[in-house]
Image (spheres, rainbow, N blue to C red):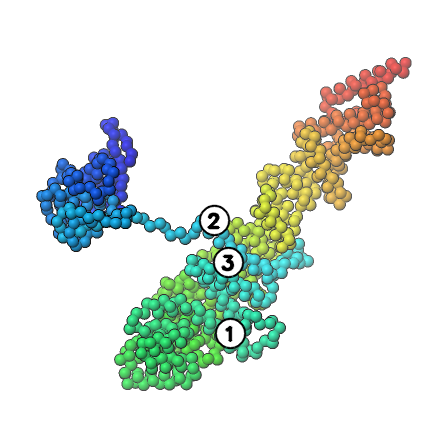
Amino acid sequence: MSAFSTKDGSSTRHERRTDVSGGCTMQVCGALMPARQPCGLDAEDASVLVEIKNLELNRPTCPYPPQQLAPSSLRLPSMLSSWKLCDVAKRCLAPHANTDKIQYTDSVDGAAALLSLLRTVLLGGGKLLLQPGGGVTSSSSASGGSVSCSLIESSYKVVLEQLVGLDPPAAKVSEEEDDEESQAVLQRPLEICLKHSTVDTPDASACPLVRPQPGVAALHEYAEWITELNDKQGDVDPLLGYWSEVWTLCEALWGRLGPADQEPDMEMPGEYEQQLERRRTFSAWLSRGATCRVEEEVALAGKGRHTEAIFSYLTGNRISEACRLAQKEGDHRLSLLLSQAMGSQYCRDLLALQLADWNRMQTDCYLPEERLRIFALLAGKPVWQSSESVVNVCSELDWKRCVAVHLWFMLPPTASVAGALARYEAAFQGSCEGGKYACAPLPPYLEAEQPDMEDEEEEESKRPLHDLCFHLLKLYSDRHYSLQQLLDPLTVTWERLDYRLSWHLWGVLQALHYSHLSASRQGLLHASYAAQLESAGLWHMAIFILLHIPDHTQRERAVREMLTLHCPLQETDESVRRERFLTERLLIPEQWIHEAKATRARRDADRHQEALHLYRAGYWSQCHRLLIQHLASDCIINDNHDYLLEFLEGLAVPEHSATIQDWDTAGRVYLDYIRVIKTLQDIQQMENAGYELERLHTNVTSLCSRIELLPCSTARDRLAQSEMAKRVANILRAVLSLQQGDAASDSLSIPLAQLAPHIARLPMPEDYTLEELRGLTQSYLRQLIVSQ
């Protein structure tokens, strides 16, 4: 409820309420006219209903529930007549019940009952159910009981029920768990791939190269993982269910034959035995894949339609269940035929002769088409011309079951997988005697939208888009089948940039010695999947993907760019773990990581981090240049010598300093300056340091002539140079004083001939120079007076 002022200054009440029974929303504002007329009422009726609403809003709060109020406590609005009330009630209650028996009444109780119903509709206080009977019944969901009171003698009973909204289904406990599951779906197959890969560094490049290990170990682990995940999650994600179909098909076509616990060194079976075993595993895969659809079709087939259920069982290779169902329905002859479905070709030929006799005598017109379809299937006839129609066995089957019925019912028991695929391919392409009688192997996201035959032919003439499982079967039948269309993401999902399954499948095919994919397509595959992982925050695993690029130049450039984009400067537990993974598992040089961090620090204008990572990356000259131009002067001014010394000592190593162009006139000067200060502090703690003093004197005098060589491009650099010069002058004075063995404060003991030439070479500003000259002059005059 809110209030606002109109142009004349009066306050107007503004309210919006929603009627949950009739779905009508009314807005009371200004002249109290409805914003939208509910239930087809005109403006006059709407004004009446608005007055009813105001009557309810202005009524004093009552401590009793509505069903305990007596009818006499309800008063009619002043402008509402009984005739008008009856007419409005009919229109307003029309969406909820038959209002033919609502008639005019001049009693107060009858009008009050209608008024109560109208309030219920307008204010959404309950759900109206008009039932045959007498009186008004109010059912409250809060108390769980009902209260009945006689309001009006009528042939209807009004039930008032409180509407309670249902809580939305809790699909996920939180978004964090959803993110964890999606991350697990991304990371687990990558862990499997890394486990079954070889990482080494070729001689031609410092960038490691990752190769899949030959064999089927990775294939079986992929199939085991996706099967467990799919069983755990159920049908939450249909894409994962399709992944399970793909990996289990690969396992059936290329996996290990025989039991899982069979020793690998056992003798391999012959070619014929392998062909039969592959047929058996492929047949089991087809049967498992058809289970859900077969059960759905059997459930939809009601009583008296057992032949449809039997046909569905046959398309799933569930012969025993089909026989039991036929026996249960009393169809014993059909059960006997079904028991011979997987028998020899002789049984099929006999049944085909029977169909031919029926057709010749035109008695097949008395058989239902569903039964003829079963007979045609058992006879190995995918298309049969009956007396009245054409029976197409594959007309209502998906493409996998079309392949299955060709393998089980239309070919000999010794036929290979390639033979069944060839028969099916001729069936959907229309190159066989029966014409085009099977659906095309469309991807799962297009299978529900099966196009017409003509439209399908037009699409295929442009660019055929087939299921990934079909491409795998083609590759199994022909080792030189194109891998480009097989690894296209559109064969799996409508998301063109989802390369997860395609990339991992390419790795398994490489392990099976399939290598006829062009370098450009390999690059597209690696780059696309790396970008997908990068967008998911797994940039370190994206580097693992990029390490599969065959060309070492492109591989190194791609890895360095990925490091530059994502290596963080701030060290966290996660960043340390990822860097350890890169260096220890993927053999990425640490130099590349520090180089990437130095680039990021330069972008962030963090000179200290940039110098640190340039130093760790082994870029000695760049690190030295950065120290001299931006950091050394601040360290000298702020007496932060230890920080600068740590860098300079590392750069002073002969192998490092030899690569630095201006080391002797810049970094070496700062290093000698700091060492002189450290040495003087140590000497002052010694009792006998004659040799150390001699060496220190040599270093200080050498430093006096080199400070002026320091490059100074800013005022801060000149200030640091002046501070160094002044401090070196004081150090030289202290060293000469210590060599004389007298107190440092006695200036007469210092030989001016050894002090003045060096101080004159120090690059000090005019005030410092005048101060030093004044001191030297005074010391010279004292020595002159003393000598006289």
Q: CA distance from mark 1 to mark 3?
A: 27 Å
In the rendered view, does 135 fall on the left or right side of 653?
left
In the rendered view, does 617 fall on the left or right side of 11?
right
Q: CA distance from mark 2 to mark 3?
A: 22 Å
Residue positioned 37% across, 63% down in the render: 448
Q: Is residue 153 visible?
A: yes
Q: Which element carries disc 3, helix, strand or loop?
A: helix
In the rendered view, does 634 fall on the left or right side of 499?
right
Label number found at residue 278: 1
Residue that carries the numbered disc 3 in the rendered image: 500
Residue placed furthest toward the right: 788
The N terminus lies in quadrant: top left
Label number found at residue 176: 2
Q: Earlier in the sequence, mark 1 or mark 3?
A: 1
Residue positioned 33% across, 50% down in the render: 166
Residue positioned 61% across, 47% down in the render: 576
